[in-house]
Image (cartoon, grey):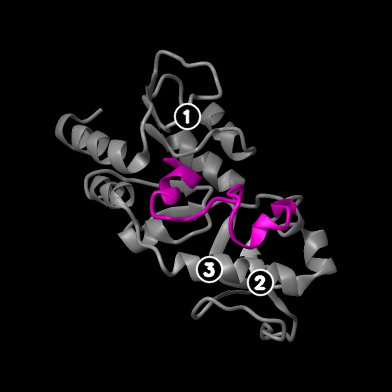
Amino acid sequence: MLTGAGISAESGIRTFRDGDGLWKTHHFADLATPDAWRRNPELVLEFYNDRRKQLLEVEPNAAHFALTKLEKKYDLHIVTQNVDDLHERAGSSKVLHLHGELRKARSTINPDLIYNIDGWELKLGDKCEKGSQLRPHIVWFGEPVDDFEKAVEIVSCADLLLVIGTSLVVYPAAGLLYHTKANIPIYLIDPGEPKFSQTSNLTFIQDKAASAVPKLVEQLLDKGF
């Protein structure tokens, strides 16, 4: 399964490209790059603190909870482009975050040193055990998506692929569709039109996730695939 911003937007999570909040006066790419961190780490921390604070004010929606029901019957793996923890808070146990996790921080000298953030605030002066400043555990623009090969492995073994709430224009995540086994059923749920040519094994459901996902899950639980 591949999920994107659309599934979280219905819980009230603003996307990067929304025009409100701190990023109304700053281009999002200027707040989510290694150069931005070097130029103004305090501003970058403020941006992510604002996003983290908002995350703690929202809850998983019907789509998130429906997927946990599906996991009770099937070996469900979720590959998500989202950095929130709504899948986990709904009860999903196998979640791979391609772009990092908002509620975690990591060392600036050793990316393997990763810490949970207690609350919403990460400040200048918060350091890892080796004494270096902690940064958001986020894959910024211009940084490699280290978990992409894990995502390819998950998708390539799947017998069915659900794609929920993503426009399929952001790479490398959008390229995961080209790593599936031939002719497996693919369901795409999104309010917008798909950005690629539809094939006979793809079922497109033009609807919001919180409405369409529970219905599809009930269908899959009842009739299988």
In the image, which residues are magenta? 1-29
Res 159 quadrant in image: top left
Q: Amino acid at mark 2?
A: Glu
Q: Tell me the quarter of the picture where residue 174 sits.
A: top right
Mark 3 vs mark 2, CA separation in Å: 10 Å
In the picture as drawn, the residue positioned furthest to the top comes out as: 200
Which label's residue is closer to the chain start, 1 or 3?
Answer: 3
Question: Mark 1 highlights which residue?
Answer: 192
Q: Is residue 135 left or right of residue 177?
A: right
Label 3: which secondary element:
helix
Q: CA distance from mark 1 to mark 3?
A: 27 Å
Structural distance between the alpha carbons of marks 1 and 2: 32 Å
The amino acid sitting under disc 3 is Arg
Task: Locate residue 214 relative to residue 186 in the image: left or right.
Answer: left
* Residue 144 location (% of width, % of height): 71, 50
Vertical arrangement, residue 129 with respect to residue 146, above or below: below
Q: Which residue is mark 2?
A: 46
Mark 3 or 2 closer to N-term?
Answer: 2
Q: Is residue 55 magenta?
A: no
| Type of amino acid at the residue the image marks with label 1 | Gly
Asked whether the viewer can see residue 139, the reply is: no
Residue under pointer 3:
52
* Residue 48 appears anywhere in the view: yes
Residue 215 lies, in percent from the top left, at 23, 36
Disc 1 secondary structure class: loop
Quarter the N terminus occupies: top left
Secondary structure found at label 2:
helix
Name the residue at 67% across, 86% down: 129
Question: Is 29 positioned to the left or the right of 218 in the image?
Answer: right
Where's the C terminus, which quadrant?
top left
State how many labels appear. Answer: 3
